Amino acid sequence: MPRTGEITFRKRSANGTRIQETLIRWVLLACASISVLTTIAVVGTLFEESFAFFRVVPLSEFLFGTQWTPTLLPRHFGILPLLAGTLMIALTSSLIAIPFGLGSAVYLSEYAPRKVRRVLKPILEILAGIPSIVFGFFALTFITPILQRLIPSTQVFNALSAGLAVGIMIIPLVASISEDAMAAVPDSMRKGAFALGATRMEVTTGIVIPAAISGIGASFILAVSRAIGETMIVAIAAGQSPVLTGNPLNSIQTMTGFMVNLSLGDIQQGTIEYKTVFAVGSMLFLMTFAMNLMARLTIRRYKEARK
Amino acid sequence: MAVKVNVEHVDFWYGDLHALKDLTFDVPEKSITALIGPSGCGKTTFLKLMNRMNDFIPGTRATGKLIYHDRNIISYDVDVVELRMKIGMVFQKPNPFPKSVYENVIYGPKRHGVKRKADLDLLVEKSLRQASLWDEAKDILNRSAMTLSGGQQQRLCIARCLAMEPDVLLMDEPTSALDPTSTQFIEDLLVRLKEDYTILIVTHNMQQAARISEKTAFFLLGEVIEFGDTREIFLNAKNPTTERYISGRFG
Ligand SMILES: Nc1ncnc2c1ncn2[C@@H]1O[C@H](COP(=O)(O)OP(=O)(O)OP(=O)(O)O)[C@@H](O)[C@H]1O
Ligand SMILES: [Mg+2]
């Protein structure tokens, strides 16, 4: 048994250590590369098929056309009905997720006693882990019947029900990211405001939220981008009607809804239907990519402002 | 000297820790009372009891009386928002808001009804001058307070507190982060302010306590071992421990 205070070092050859370290570095690099390479491959395929699509369909028809009938003759490839459907879902879900998410975050970070917070925060995170298909059936079998009872003209498949379900699903996302941003505001700032006779609400709105605004903003953007990309709920509950409508009680179709729908049927590689899926996918990718980029930029700006 | 706050048999606990023990003394108005004593003896705790900032710490408990304008500060029915407008506090560590210098100063007054731009402008200049920050800050009023130096931040916090024109000022080692010149300014400021304000200041600087205060309370392990005229305490303390602490032969 070694005497206390005496440390023995294992002898290693300097060369062996160096080889080992180099090996580890390469293995780790390979791990990191896999996701990068996959992304490049996916985006590559997406754009390649999209280019093939645009050789047949003019970009202007795709972007500005108001009819979407890619599988029916005469074929029309105007994406606006799908875009409108997607935006309708994004809007309704944001109207739910942003206020309730921010409200939960404020409660958890500023009002909740420590014990309550310790219980609620994990529950919120469990909610974030529920598969979206569950929310889809929740929309169809629970929200829609309620809507139909309230407003009888509501269709079985409709944008509102799906939008509400998407909204409920992303509340935890907004709440969790906003709460992290608010919890990162140093307590001494709150104390400073309290000592000047501010109420808890004034401290929240005047000090904590402004100090955490970029994190909160980022959570909103991520939520919207999540809503745009959501597939399962809209495929189940929103319908399959790619028509331009302003009525959220009607059946609609979103970009993701269209893609999943077409992919389920058997489509031949190389056909125009096949290429259409990729064109819509590219559009979707560009939208969510832009949103995520915005979220990143706001977070970066927030970090710089804090320096 | 008339009495501003009567401290009568005040006890305070952080959970099981008996942090303040049977404090009894009178804080005279329009004067400076220095709270001195070794680290961890309860000075900050006492200060925070005066404007109820200890309310935020779960598991704390206070008994006894802190009589201020015929009300017991410690009792539950005191409106703490109103209390904190009257009893302002400067913290041990500077804690400016992540807002502009200007907005930091007007945070309190704006919340309590001062709305006109001209009034706010005047208030900002006056408060910053009082805190001897005006010359450095007048050209950067719109810059984030987070970009100021530590000492400037502390003077900003003093200005922010003065802008509320409180009745009592609680200062927790306000000059411990400041250079000698700013310290001098702040001391001069406090001496001027005591014409109108009642000031309690925690300090580890014995010369400072001797220079500016009328009364001194010597804290030791949660008790006030000695309270009296600063002159008296510094020239011939009754308690030998006080005497040893003041002369730097403590511990
Ligand atoms: N939030 C808290 N929870 C539990 N105990 C605390 C808390 N704050 C202070 N204490 C304890 O109360 C005692 C008094 O602390 P206090 O901060 O009042 O000392 P102080 O005299 O201001 O010291 P210093 O000169 O170092 O600032 C210390 O023993 C400290 O550990
Ligand atoms: Mg202290």
Image (spheres, helix red, strand yellow):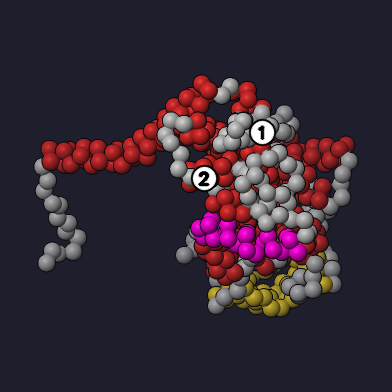
Mark whose residue sits in front, 1 or 2: 1
For the point 53% across and 57% down, the residue is A133
Helix, strand or loop at label 1? It is loop
What amino acid does circle 2 point to? Val
- Numbered range of the magenta stretch: A130-149
**Left or right side of A165 for B75:** right
The residue located at (58%, 57%) in the rendering is A136
Residue that badge 2 annotates: A260
> Chain ID for label 1?
A
Q: Which of B99 and A65 is in front in this view?
A: A65
- The answer to whether the residues at label 1 and label 2 have Cβ atoms under 8 Å apart is no
Quick one: label 2, few (<14), some, or many (20+) residues within 10 Å? some
- The residue pinned by badge 1 equals A67
Residue drawn at x 68%, y 40% as measured from the top left? A243
The quadrant of the image that shows the N terminus of chain B is bottom right
Q: Which mark is residue B61?
A: none
Amino acid of disc 1:
Gln
Would you say residue A148 sits in the magenta stretch? yes
Q: Is mark 2 within 8 Å of ligand 1?
A: no
Q: Residue B182 or B89: which is nearer the viewer?
A: B89
Helix, strand or loop at label 2? It is: helix
Q: How many marks?
A: 2
Q: How far apart are marks 1 and 2 (CA)?
A: 19 Å
